[in-house]
Image: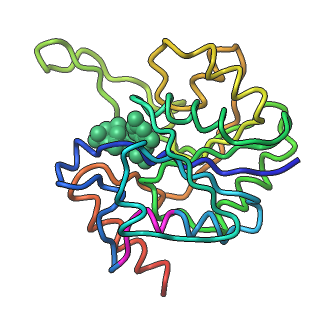
Amino acid sequence: SARLALVPAAGSGSRMGSDIPKQYLTLLGKPLLAITLESLLSADSIDLVYLLLSPDDSWFRDQVALEHPKLRVLYCGGASRAETVRNGLLAASGAADDWILVHDAARPCLTPAEIDRLVATLQDDPVGGLFALPVADTVKRADAAGRVAATVPRDDLWRAQTPQMFRRDLLSRALAAGASAAVTDESSAVEALGLAPRLVVGPVGNIKVTYPADLAQAELLLTMQAE
Ligand code: CTP
Ligand code: MG
């Protein structure tokens, strides 16, 4: 069976507030999206990388124009991340037992070695799983007035990252079933089927670029990787 990466990159980056989508902003002289793709393309454990763009995306062609024997570009973006991934999975050909690794375009600091580690950890798992990090801060639940309603024990709380890795048949079933639900990652769609994806401790530096301040942090992390 093959191992495919799906990279949803059809978002508009509203929280970043820039005039172009955040995946096309420049980090250390390169488009953020190119950095994410190069990492996946150079991981030995990945056979093909499917880039999922908005149907009206012109930035990739004009400003990135990356070509690679392992790269396939699909203009299949939807209204939500889940819809983009669902469309991409339908368009990407292959076998039912292929492993699918869904990775946010907005996480450029993931290294090929970490991708290989996730694949090696999960490739015999009956369900699949995801990179995630144990919560380090004390966690509060808020009331409607913005005051603390409760302190939530954090010992069993994790923050989900990507890649999230599942077999094609399971992921297709999960995403079809979760079509109407508020599904913000692949794992939650799989959980809704009653399954328990495995949590694999992810890299601390695998941040999602969301707000303007994240750009400088991503550049710092990439610089440290290059040293
Ligand atoms: N994404 C997508 N299709 C959508 C929405 C998001 O492919 N309809 C992708 C984004 O491009 C990003 C990833 O999903 O790579 C994670 O989403 P997020 O960080 O929320 O990006 P945006 O939705 O673009 O940002 P925002 O929520 O601030 O608008
Ligand atoms: Mg979003």
Looking at the image, which is closer to me, 78 or 212?
A: 78
Where does the image place residue 225, in percent across and percent down from the top left? 49, 78
Residue plotted at (73% across, 59% down): 46
53 relative to 131 in the view: left or right: left
181 relative to 177 in the view: left or right: left
Q: How many numbered marks, from 0 up?
A: 0
Residue plotted at (55% across, 52% down): 51
Kindly indicate the quadrant of the structure image that contains residue 81.
top left
202 relative to 123 in the view: left or right: left
Residue plotted at (58% across, 68% down): 39
* Magenta span of residues: 30-36
Where does the image place residue 28, in percent across and percent down from the top left? 33, 79
The reply to whether the magenta stretch includes residue 34 is yes
Looking at the image, which is closer to me, 88 or 144?
A: 88
45 relative to 67 in the view: left or right: right
Q: Specify how the rendered protein is coloured.
A: rainbow
Name above or below for residue 79 compared with residue 55.
above
Where does the image place residue 36, in percent across and percent down from the top left? 50, 63
Kindly indicate the quadrant of the structure image that contains residue 99.
top right
Where does the image place residue 152, in percent across and percent down from the top left? 38, 23
Name above or below for residue 205 compared with residue 142.
below
Residue plotted at (36% across, 45% down): 56
Name above or below for residue 207 compared with residue 183.
below
The reply to whether the magenta stretch includes residue 173 is no
Is residue 136 something that shows in the picture?
no
- Which residue lies most toward the bottom here? 227
Name above or below for residue 86 compared with residue 194.
below
Quadrant of ligand 2 in image: top left
Is residue 19 something that shows in the picture?
yes
Magenta portion: prevailing SS class:
helix
